[in-house]
Amino acid sequence: MNILIAEDEKSIANSLEKNLTEEGFNTKIAVNGEEAISLVKNNNFDMLILDWRMPELTGLEVCKILRGSGFDKPIILLTALSDVEKKVNALNCGADDYITKPFSFEELMARISAVLRRYQKAHNIILFDDFKLDLINHSLVTPTEKIKLPEKEFELLKYFLENKGVIVNKETLCRDVWELPFTPNTNLVEVTVKNLRRKLEEYSEKKYIKTVYGEGYIFLTE
Amino acid sequence: MNILIAEDEKSIANSLEKNLTEEGFNTKIAVNGEEAISLVKNNNFDMLILDWRMPELTGLEVCKILRGSGFDKPIILLTALSDVEKKVNALNCGADDYITKPFSFEELMARISAVLRRYQKAHNIILFDDFKLDLINHSLVTPTEKIKLPEKEFELLKYFLENKGVIVNKETLCRDVWELPFTPNTNLVEVTVKNLRRKLEEYSEKKYIKTVYGEGYIFLTE
DNA sequence: AATAAATATGAAAAAATTTTAATAATTGTT
DNA sequence: AACAATTATTAAAATTTTTTCATATTTATT
């Protein structure tokens, strides 16, 4: 997950970068609007955080320009000003949300989560790290290619992503993914988990699917 | 495609029914709001056309009640009144569109097409007759069951539905559905078309896929 | 360390899907 | 009606996916 932070105040930018990095995001900082636009052109960001008040090109103007050129990822605008007209203006220029300084990092994270959730739902995707699960085409989209998954592997990965960070046991998987009325006396879950693990390993050295001995599996992105 | 017409003026109701039937829709008429609500409860309509001004329960109130109880199909409100406040009110109560009398049937049809297109896109489905192609689960949903389609049959049916009423030839299908760089010297298209025809025949006596000799296939719903 | 339970792995069997190949049937032209 | 081209159908071969089965490996407990 790649986030661009466009913020001319270095202390704020660095603090945001530090906190977002700790949450598992990859971040880049642009110190002004022009640099932001240039970075967006040359990178694949999943969302933008734009400070409204920057010299030369404001965050709002960056937002307008990017939306005008077809950029469709989530944009959050940060500003010290707080009135309804500004907010309406921001949203009319294509921002997805708008946060007034000062704000807590927790609030920013909640807003980020909300706009990403909305974006994923609107586009029928589930994002994790640099991957995207395409719910329409039943494909895993990596930075370099698009792999059509066999149906059971797709369903299993989708289930894990919808239950990220939660232990799911084999009985639950048989019921919910396989839609079986009872758990069979064979290890089809283990084998399919192995096949999915193998497939993910082709594209990342991270181990996303962890076994919790005696309990089940947990999908983790950190 | 099933449409409910709630309209207390018999001549209007009958005229709408006649015209919509000629366009291939199945229609039912409710003469008042109460009957409309009852019919919605006992039928599976794909959309509603509600006259705003009916005795007792107005179309607007029917709309509010149904939306309140979770009805999520498209609703078009008809009214003789024409002012912005009424329109905002209708849309705020969950109507998808709003047409002022008098209107031409052509305009109504255009509005119906627009709201149905929006509904299908929002729900990731393609409707045809009493069927629904579920683009997320790659299933054909009939009035009685939900059939998961093998991938190639799903892709072929989706392609036909996206090109309804248009002749598509075998070369195009090889390129767009099979994603082949050239047309093979085997009859895989014919065989898959046969398989899909067979599957549709299990659920309808209508022949949707017609062969245009020497040209290709055309998917028709009438 | 020994033991048992749980899980991972590899191979193969079973099932499903797709494609190929052969031939029957249909269409259009002469 | 004869002929050729196109399409439909059938069966089987090929391929892919899913599941089963056997066994290796890991985990936890004593």
Image (tube, coloured by chain):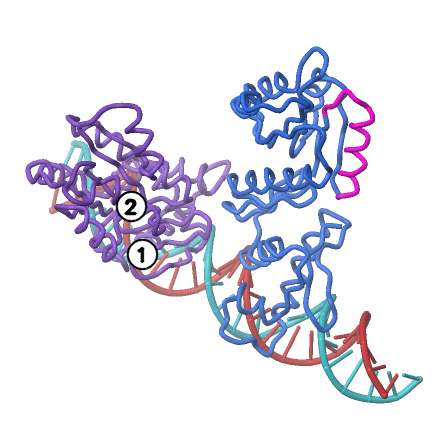
Chain colours: A purple, B blue, C red, D cyan
- Graded by Cα atoms within 10 Å as few (under 14), some (14 to 19) or many (20 or more), the crowding at tag 1 reads some
User: What is the x, y in percent for residue B30?
Assistant: 75, 22
Pick the front one: B47 or A70: A70
Residue for point 68% across, 29% down: B49
Asked if residue A220 lies left or right of residue B84, the reply is left
Do we see residue A29 in this rendering?
no
Chain letter of the residue carrying label 2: A
Chain letter of the residue carrying label 1: A
Residue for point 62% across, 68% down: B189
User: What is the x, y in percent for residue B162?
Assistant: 59, 54
Whether tag 1 and tag 2 are in contact, CB under 8 A, the answer is no
Q: Which mark is residue B168?
A: none
**Are the residues under badges 1 and 2 in a single subunit?**
yes
Q: Which mark is residue A142?
A: 1
Which residue carries the number 2 mark? A128
Q: Which segment is the magenta one?
A: B6-23
Residue B49 lies in the magenta stretch: no
**Mark 2 secondary-structure assignment:** strand
Residue for point 75% across, 43% down: B24
- Graded by Cα atoms within 10 Å as few (under 14), some (14 to 19) or many (20 or more), the crowding at tag 2 reads some
Q: Main secondary structure of the magenta part?
A: helix
In the picture as drawn, the residue positioned furthest to the top comes out as B56
Distance from label 1 to label 2 (Cα)? 10 Å
Q: Quadrant of residue A174?
A: top left
The numbered mark, 1 or 2, whose residue comes first in the sequence reads: 2
User: What is the x, y in percent for residue A213?
Assistant: 25, 39
Vertical order, B81 against B134 (above or below)? above
Residue B11 lies in the magenta stretch: yes
User: What is the x, y in percent for residue B140?
Assistant: 61, 46
